[in-house]
Image: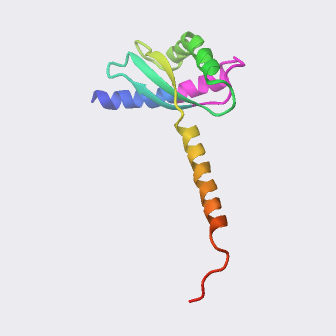
């Protein structure tokens, strides 16, 4: 039963944190950031927030900006979500989307190279 509660809370936290980052934070170090996943501890006291950085901002700068805004984000979460204790937030960078895009490009480039290297004339049957 506790697992269902932490899953529901994780979904709600993901939605609210994404909204706070996009609309409430005015730090120029934060560019286009996507909240990929929120993993809430079983006792609901801590939450790991996995983010993906979709522009060319330095990852360390974005992470530092989000870490400096943890208290503000937590305060706003406390106002938006009715809980006794708001979980402690820990931001982590998730490179899975960037990795998938890079791998897709590598595969497309290899397919193109294979098509160019293939013989132009098909053998007669």
Whether 108 is drawn above or below 97: the answer is: below
> Where are the magenta residues, as a range?
15-34
What x and y, as percent, mark residue 93? 53, 27
Point out the residue furthest to the left here: 1
37 in the magenta segment: no
What x and y, as percent, mark residue 96? 52, 37
Q: In this view, does 94 lie to the left or right of 116?
A: left
Q: Which of the 4 quarters of the picture holds residue 54?
A: top right
Mark count: 0
Q: Which of 114 and 9 is in front in this view?
A: 114
Whether 121 is drawn above or below 1: the answer is: below
* Residue at image coords 60%, 56%: 110
State the quadrant of the N terminus: top left
Q: Which of the 4 quarters of the picture holds residue 83?
A: top left
28 in the magenta segment: yes
* Residue at image coords 66%, 18%: 25
Whether 53 is drawn above or below 108: the answer is: above
Q: Nearer the viewer, residue 95 or 119?
A: 119
* Residue at image coords 65%, 26%: 22
């Amino acid at each position: 039963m506790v697992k269902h509660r932490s899953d529901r809370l994780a979904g709600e936290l993901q939605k609210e944190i994404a909204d706070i980052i996009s609309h409430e934070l005015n730090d120029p170090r934060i560019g286009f950031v996507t909240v990929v996943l929120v993993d809430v501890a079983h006792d609901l006291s801590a939450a790991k927030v996995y983010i993906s950085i979709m522009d060319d901002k330095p990852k360390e700068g974005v992470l530092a900006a989000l870490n400096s805004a943890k208290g503000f984000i937590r305060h706003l979460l406390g106002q938006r979500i009715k809980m006794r204790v708001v979980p402690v937030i820990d931001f982590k960078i998730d490179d899975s989307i960037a990795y998938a895009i890079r791998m897709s490009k590598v595969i497309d480039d290899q397919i193109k190279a294979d098509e160019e290297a293939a013989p132009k004339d098909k053998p007669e049957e």
